[in-house]
Image (tube, grey):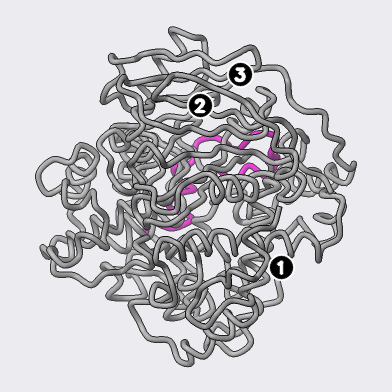
Amino acid sequence: MLHTAGPLLTVDVAEKETHTENIDDVLSSFVGGRGVATKLAHDRIPFDADPFGPENSLFFTTGPLQVSNMSFTGRMNCTGVSPLTDGLLSSNAGGFLSRHFGATGYGAVELTGRSDDLLAIHVTDDGIEFEEVPELAGATTSEVGEYMAENHELGDEQLLVSGPAGENRVRFASIMTTEHRAFGRGGLGAVMGAKNVKCVSFAGDSAPDIDIDPIQMDVHREAATADDHPMKSAGTTSVTEYANHVSALPSYYFSELEFEGASDIGGDAVSDKKYKKGTCSQCAFACKLPTKDEETGVETEGPEYETVMAFGSNAGVDDVVSVMKSNDLCDELGMDTISCGDVVSAYLAANDEFGNSDLIHDLVEKIAHREDEGDLLAEGVHRAADELGVEDWTVKGLEFAAHDGRTLNGQGLAFATSNRGADHMYAEFYSKEYPLVSKDEAVDPTGLEGKPPLIVEKENYNAILDSGVVCKFSRDFMTEERLETLLDTDYDELMEIGARVVALERHFNNERGFDREDDTLPYDLPDFERALSEYYEIRGWDDDGTVPEDSGVVSAD
């Protein structure tokens, strides 16, 4: 089986010491990316670790396909205990960092401990340098990039950055890279901030020699020539009007499922502001959205569909430039646009201020710096809902993405089963319930009959994509046969690995107190409890949502 190569580099930021160790057994069993990071985190982070404590670690990993020239491989993974969900969580980001990371020759990098000094850490194939950077306290993503370019000749695509939100331990702070790309969900930027690490850079010329099947070029060629694909012009925002049409677009802090101004913030509106192509490393699909508004000078990358929901329809905003500005502020300050937009929308609901763009942008700034009401909102919806007097629209403490489960019932169940919480990309089941989204055979969005086994398969498959690492938007190009060929093993073996990754995440969270009671939704779905029990039975878990200790998964190498 194809897998990534290289040792684990552990960086103890408290002692400013590093050491390496062989992890070939983990690499050969879990491919790379999320799989390898999950296994390492499960075995090395104490089950009772404080997310903000020195005992929590961040694991950065790529996969074997990051040495290829194939489209959809410009991504990498980060794993740690989330300060937002309090569970083990993986997030991945696109851009151009993954190749620079791989060029250091390390199979995984672990950050542990807590520094007394604000640090930048420079990781190269020649060694690791610790740089004290007190002058970067409070610096934004772009300010850190400018400093590193001037002082070290490093580009944004070589950096991991914790913005002001991370330094201030905003529970949904992102780790930023390539300026506008984010390890967005779950607040891992706050973990990096709590370690007093402002920036990590990667450089080298020691990428592992991994032989990738020539089929990679078929995928690359098809991605380059898929000119009629809607995501090539409008990215994920291409689904906005359709989601609105089928009543799956959360609006006005989840009180409605349609938004009258959807066309003003959707695919065409964003495309009108797009001024050049944008992509990730080696990817010919180029679905990113560099946008600019000439009148106001607002320039950003995006917004993507989830941001259009969170800062648009859910906030009652029908002005695409306002959403662009919210997107840019979150990128500069280092925050997940979904969680930030949802908690801002909760505040707007509590204060009858839907559509107030000036207030929204002011709140985003206040959240990042924990000023005034921003201090409460920086805790996220789950911890702020009671004080705001609004309903808690989260699963496991993670704010909801779009693709509303009240209409797309299978996605609703998938939100509940996800170890990550209310994240649409964990199972990505919406792609089966939107006929236009992919070439998957569509299923009726109503009801849960027959969906638990499909959700299990999607979760396992996505765990493999996240271990490869392969972008989820490869779904129209990455067949089962191609994945088998690229990773040099049969599909059933890959699904078994995916299942082990999901079970390791679940077991870690079980040890932290998670069980069936956490697999819930803020709305009712017909037949939900039966479907949830069926899901557990398929996975071989107990009916209380826990992984049996004798399952063999926990001790699997």
Is 82 rendered above or below residue 196? below
**Badge 1 amino acid:** Lys
Q: Secondary structure at mark 1?
A: loop
Residue at mark 2: 11
The residue singled out by tag 3 in the image is: 203
- The location of residue 409, given as percent across then percent down, is 50, 81
Q: Earlier in the sequence, mark 1 or mark 3?
A: 3
Tag 1–tag 3 contact (CB < 8 Å): no
Residue at (33% x, 64% y) in the render: 261
Farthest-out residue, top: 151
Q: Main secondary structure of the magenta part?
A: loop
Q: What's the CA distance linking mark 1 and mark 2? A: 43 Å
Q: How much space separates mark 2 and mark 3, taking CA atoms?
A: 16 Å
State which region is magenta.
Answer: 264-288
Vertically, is 21 above or below 358? above
Tell which circle, 2 or 3, labels the residue nearer the N-terminal end.
Answer: 2
Q: Position of residue 317 (x, y in %)?
A: 27, 58
Q: Amino acid at mark 3?
A: Ala
Q: Which residue is mark 1?
A: 439
Q: Say which of marks 2 and 3 sits in front.
A: 2
Mark 3 is surrounded, within 10 Å at the Cα level, by few (under 14), some (14 to 19) or many (20 or more) other residues, namely: many
Q: CA distance from mark 1 to mark 3?
A: 38 Å
